[in-house]
Amino acid sequence: MSREQGQEQKLTEPHGQPQEQEAFGRRAAMLLGSILKQPVPAEDQARYNTFQAIARLGLGRECKLAQEQLAAASSDPGGESMFVRHGQIDAWLRFGHLYPTELAADVRHLLTRNDPYHMVHGTENHKIMNAVSGYLSAQCWPGWSHAAAVKERCQTYLEHYFTRVARFGQGEFDSTTYSVFYLTTLCTLYDFCTDPVLRSKAAMMLDWYLANTACEWLHGMFTGAHSRDYHPTNTNSGAAGGTTAAWLYFGGTVPDFRQGEPHYSSILALSSYAAPWPILHAARDRSIPFEHLETHDVAGASDAVHDGRATTLLAGQTACSFPVKGYGYISRSGIRKYTYMDAGYALGSLADGRRGDIVWSGQLRRWSLDWSCRQQESTLFFTHPFPDFGHPEERYMERWLGSSPYEQVIQHQAALVALYHIPVGETYQYGPRDAFPSDADPYIDGFIPEEVLLLLEQDGEGWLYAHGRSVLVALKTWRPAEWVNVGDPARRRLRSYGLTNAVVLQTANPLDYSDPSDRELPLAEQYAAELSRFREAMQARTRLDMSAMNRAQPGLGYTALSGDFIEIVYDGGRTVNGKAIDYSSWPLISNRFMYAGLGAGVLDIASDSGRMRWDYNKWTVTMIEDHQVREAGEESHAQ
C-alpha cells in the first residue's frame, strides 16, 4: 500500500480521521488566535514578526499588519536568520500571491541573496532550517545563480539526515523547545515540494518525529529525559515550542500561550499534513503501564559525526549487524533513554556514557518525575548545578537549567537511583561552552514543588514521602539533606552537600495503595491513608545497600517495591537482579505500541485499527497483517 493509499485507509478507521481533523482544527484555531495576542519582544522581533504574520495571514486577519511584519523581518532578519528564512519561504509559498510588489521583491532578495544555505556547523535545527529553506528557494527561483548548487546540496543533506535519524536517532533529541522546528520545516517541505519522492519522505519523517514523541506524552506534558530543555520546572502549562507542537497533534491540557514560544507552530496549524491514527493512539492510551526505550546520538561507523568531534566506536553491537559509534552531539558514546509511563505519571532518565563522554550538558535534563496536575510545576528532579555557558554572571542555579556531567543514573520501572561523583579541581570543557570548575557547587539540589504535593512527610530514616494526587513518591539522599532558599524566598529546594552523593527515588500509582473503605473518608484523609500504606510498604519491602559509597568508584544497590534489585557503580556496571544492562542491545524505539531496531530503518506501530509499517529503506508505509510488533515488555529492560 502506498502512503496515499495509507492516508485513504485512515479515513475509514473506526476512530476516524474526520473526528481527528475536527479536533485538530479546534486546537489549531485556538493556537492561531492566541498567537495574535502575543507581544513582540524587542530582543527577538524578526522571528516573532515572521511567525505571527503567518498566523495572521492564515486566519485572514490584520493582513496589512502581517505584511508589515514580514517586511520588517526581511529587512533585518537578525543573527540567527535561518529561522526567519524558513518562516519567510513558508509564508511566500502560502500567501505570496497576496504580497504587494515591494514586499515580494524584499522577500526574494532575502532568500536569494548570496548563498547562506550551508549545513557544515551548528545545531541540527539550524541545519534543517537552512536545508529546507535553501531547497524551496531554489525551487521557487530556478533562475537564481546559485539555485542548482543550493538545491542539490540541500537535498543531499536532507536525504542523508533522514537516513541517519530514521536508523540512529537524533543528536538534538526530544527538546521541549527545538523539536518544533523539525516538524515545521518538514511540514513546509511536505506542503510545497514539487518532487513527489522528497515530499513523501518529508511526510514519513514527520510521522517518525511524532512517533518518537508519542509515548512520552502524558495528557499535555512532554515527559522523560530531554536534550536542550529550557523549561525544566515548567512542565504543565508553559507553551514551549516543542510542547506546543506536540499538544497541537496529541491534545491534552491546554498550554498557557502567554508564556513560551507558541508562534512557531503557526505553520503546523496551517499545514495539510495529518498525523496517522496509530501514532495518536500511542500518545493517548495510558490504560496499561509500560516501558519506553529509545536510542539517540549515534551513527554508523563510517558516517560523519557532529562538528567533527572525536567519538567512541561502540564495539560488540548486538542491536544491529554493523558497528556504530557516538554521533557526539550530547555524548561521545551515544544516548539510551528509558521512560516508565503510568496512568498519571512518568519517570524518565537516560544513560549517556562515562566521565569525559559528555559534550553538552548545560541544557540537558537527565532524569525527572512528571505527573498529571493542574498546577504548572508538577515535576521533581535532583541535579548537581551546572551552567549552560559557564559565564561567571550566569544565573544557572535559579533557572535549574542543565545537568551535571558528573551524574549517572539507573532506572528500572518505577524506581531510580542517581549517583553523583564530583571531582576536585577539574576544569570541564564542554562543547562550544566556556570551561567551568567541576566543584564550584559541591552539593546536589532537589526541585520539589511543595505547592503541588498534597502531603509531604519525612521520617527518622531520612526518607521523604509525598502524595501528588496521581503519584506517590519516596526519596532519600545518601548524605543528609536540608531545605534552603535560593533566589525567590517563597521557593525552597532540598540541598544535600558533598562531592559524592546519591538519590534514591521510588514511585507508585496511588490506586495500588487505596482501599474500598477509603471511599467513606474525606479526600484529605483518603490521601493520608494511601500515603501511610505506601510508607509501610516501603519500610517492609525495600532495602538500601550503601556500603560501596565511600569507594574510589562509589556504588549503591536498592531493592525496589517490585522486589527487583538495581545496582549502579560510577563509571562501572549497572545491573538489574544481578544481570548487567546491555546498552549495546538497546533498540531505536521500543514500547507496547511500536518497535524499531537500531540501524534497521523499519518502524512498526500497532493500534486498535491494525498494524502499520514505516520502511525507511524503501520509503513506504504499509498495513501489515501477520507481523508481530515486538514490545518492550517481552524482555526486562532498565536504564
Image (cartoon, helix red, strand yellow):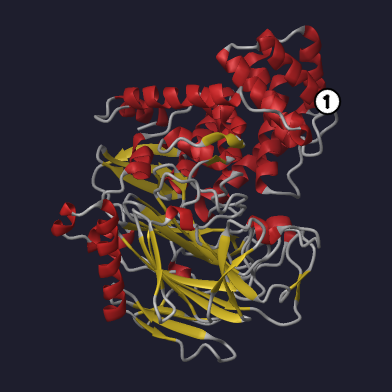
Seen from the viewer's position, the closer of residues 411 and 442 is: 442
Residue 211 image point, x, y percent: 43, 44
Q: Which residue is mark 1?
A: 145
Most extreme residue toward the left is 517
Q: Secondary structure at mark 1?
A: loop
Asked whether residue 412 appears in the rendered view, the answer is no
Relative vertical location of residue 249 with respect to residue 108 in this rendering, above or below? below
Q: Which picture quadrant has residue 543?
A: bottom left
The residue located at (52%, 27%) in the rendering is 31
Residue 277 image point, x, y percent: 35, 35
Residue 441 image point, x, y percent: 69, 73
Most extreme residue toward the right is 114
Specify whether 9 is left or right of 321.
left
Specify whether 51 is left or right of 471.
right
Q: Which picture quadrant has residue 501?
A: bottom right
Residue 498 image point, x, y percent: 62, 81
